[in-house]
Amino acid sequence: MSPLERTGRVGVIGAGIVGLATAWELEQRGIEFDVFEYGAPGGGQSRGESRIFRHAHDDPRLVELALRSRRLWHEWEREFGVQLISPDGVVSIGRRVLKQLDLMREVEPGIRVGEIGPARLRDVLPVLADYDGPIVLDEEGGAIRTRLTIASLLERVGQWLIPVKVDAVEILPGGQAAIRAGGIRRVYDTVIVCAGVGTERLAALNEVAIPVQVEAQIRVTYPIRPEHRRGLASIRDGSGRHESSGVYGSPVRGNTHYSIGLSQTGAVSGNGLIDWDQVERLAGRTDEWVRRGGPGVDPDRGGGGACWGAPLPWSAGGFAVWRRGPVLHLVGNNMFKMAPVLAEALVDAALEGGVPEGMGRRDRLGSPISAASQKTL
């Protein structure tokens, strides 16, 4: 059999954070694999700064997954010898945060998350304007060092990266699947598709319909004023003040800059192109929030852009796995923080069959439910 056509154990499509994490999980278990990626690793849905690790969610199942994922991030840090999540916490403000706090404590009574006052807020996040409403500090949360994380994973699994665009995944009669890419055809026992916004296209070729809406997520990075350049908490502002429906942000570049994103997303046309006029308008709204809500950063020196998002209809922050035969398709949004636990679940499913427990499309992961009703699902 030629190098252009051979059989392997697992083929991974996509070298974003989940694809690379999955490859690393396969490597640790001694399982043969290849990773296919046409663009720069981490350059698609995983691109951009202001990635935040947080435990706060409206769905207790996501809280549980975040708790498991945080423990795995600690393992990554010990293995790679670097700090991947800042130790400075995440501040959440707005009316919903106390309900989320109660839910986190219901799931994990000993969790290091609690309500704080305005004085403590000024201490952990002096760049933020004064606020006297509900404030919650997640001490185990923090800013994810995205580029360092991608680089650390690439150092371990990059030798198995095949830099070609995947044209199709064929489901074969014998229970295997073939990846066609760049003039090669390789057969695998299982294929894991975690190609971000490209997953829907590959799934559709095998008549798997995934109801995902591609969006452009806006992030703008601003210099922090010199007097505040130290360890800073990340921010989740759901207060609705400053005419914003939702803002999130985190310190980046060695705490010299702060990267801000909006919960509102930009439009993507039918041909897959970003509506840049709308992006500019949203960036302008980000500038305005900084002028009013973030006096500790310079609103006149921002720069940034957009990255892809792929939310599912039932949740802006949920995800799900579709399976057809030997092919698993992962789709969702805000998955960077969940990458270690997703990798474990995907590899388990690849070896055992089925989809990861609780992550099927019918589970509607990310939909707000009570911890009590969770037991009936």
Image (tube, helix red, strand yellow):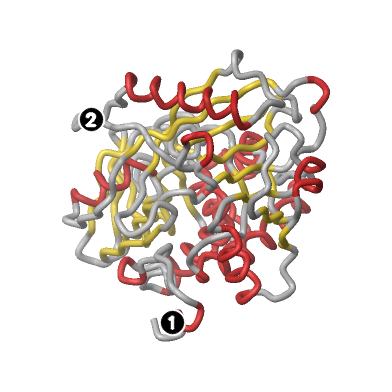
**Residue 284, image x, y percentages:** 46, 21
Q: Is residue 323 left or right of residue 250?
A: left
Q: Secondary structure at mark 2?
A: loop
- Residue that numbered label 1 is attached to: 373
Name the residue at the top extreme.
Answer: 300
> In this orientation, which residue lies closer to the viewer: 89 or 31?
89
Residue 182 is situated, as x and y percent measured from the top left of the image, at 31, 32
Q: Amino acid at mark 2?
A: Ser
Q: Quadrant of residue 279?
A: top left
Of all residues shown, which one is farthest toward the left? Answer: 207
Residue under the image location 72 percent in, 42 percent down: 233
318 relative position to 295: left or right: left
Quick check: 303 above or below 172? above
Q: Is residue 352 visible?
A: yes
Q: In the image, residue 364 lies at what x, y percent?
A: 35, 67
Task: State if disc 2 and disc 1 touch (CB < 8 Å).
Answer: no
Question: Quarter-wise, where is residue 216 in the image?
Answer: top left
Q: State the residue at coordinates (31%, 26%).
A: 274
Q: Which residue, given by chain and number where applicable, does mark 2 sit on?
A: 269
Separation of disc 1 and disc 2 at Cα? Answer: 38 Å
Circle 1: element type: helix
Q: Residue at x 48, y 29 (%)?
A: 40
* Amino acid bearing label 1: Ser
As drawn, the residue found furthest toward the bottom would be 376
